[in-house]
Amino acid sequence: MTDLLRRVRHDERGWSGLEWLGVILAVFVVLSLVPQFRHALDWAYEHLVGKNNVDADGNPAPGVLVRGIIVGVASIGIFAGAIFIINYTNLGRKLAFLVTGAAFFGFLAIVGLLYTLYAPRGLRPTLIEGLNSFQLRILPGAMMVGALILFAMFVVAMSRVEAEEEE
């Protein structure tokens, strides 16, 4: 991680590694608006992982799991990474990390609280038929408590860093 942050420093020769990464991602986002590019990505994904079909028993193919993991990791990376880069330009490395962490875990705590209070009601999916209304709330409640603890840790660390900078 420190090697990556060392490469971020701007020198007189041109763009830093982080600036190049931003440009490449911006070009990728613009290309993803083109239907032919999206079709090529889907074709490449299906040939690498497999189609997102369901077998005879109704179980999803492994491609569904792989796509879910890719989308989940990319979403968290883009969400937290974009906020970190914006904060990094204004606050510096250490404080940007702490502010981004506090914001991310604060967001997760709010989402966990809302899901715990307003868990899905009505018809249940067949995969979770045996769970009652309390059992549906255990996982988001645990996520909320864990996110609140991490949020508090980031806020305390942030206050310590600010106190050190004032001295």
Image (spheres, rainbow, N blue to C red):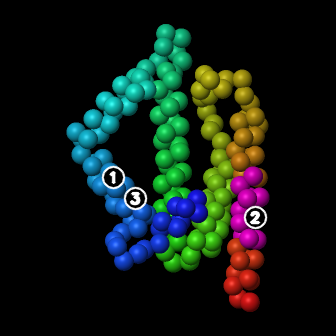
Tag shown at residue 127: none
What residue lies at 74% left-to-right and 46% top-to-bottom?
141
Residue placed under numbered mark 2 in the picture: 153
Secondary structure under badge 2? helix
Amino acid at dot 3: Leu
> Where residue 62 sits: x, y (%)?
51, 23
What residue lies at 47% left-to-right and 26% top-to-bottom?
63
Q: CA distance from mark 3 to mark 2?
A: 30 Å
> Where residue 23 sits: x, y (%)?
34, 61
Q: CA distance from mark 1 to mark 2?
A: 34 Å
Stretch in magenta: 146-157
Amino acid at dot 1: Val
Q: Magenta span: helix, strand or loop, mainly?
A: helix
Secondary structure under badge 3? helix
Q: Badge 3: few (under 14), some or many (20 or more) residues near its Cα, within 10 Å?
A: few
What residue lies at 58% left-to-right and 59% top-to-bottom?
1
Residue placed under numbered mark 3 in the picture: 21
Q: Would residue 163 appear left or right of 70 to someone viewing this image?
A: right
Residue placed under numbered mark 1 in the picture: 29
Q: CA distance from mark 3 to mark 1?
A: 12 Å
Amino acid at dot 2: Met
Which is nearer the N-term, disc 3 or disc 2? 3
Image quadrant for the C terminus?
A: bottom right
Above or below, 101 against 77 in this view is below
Q: Would residue 80 appear left or right of 42 to someone viewing this image?
A: right
The residue most toward the bottom is 167
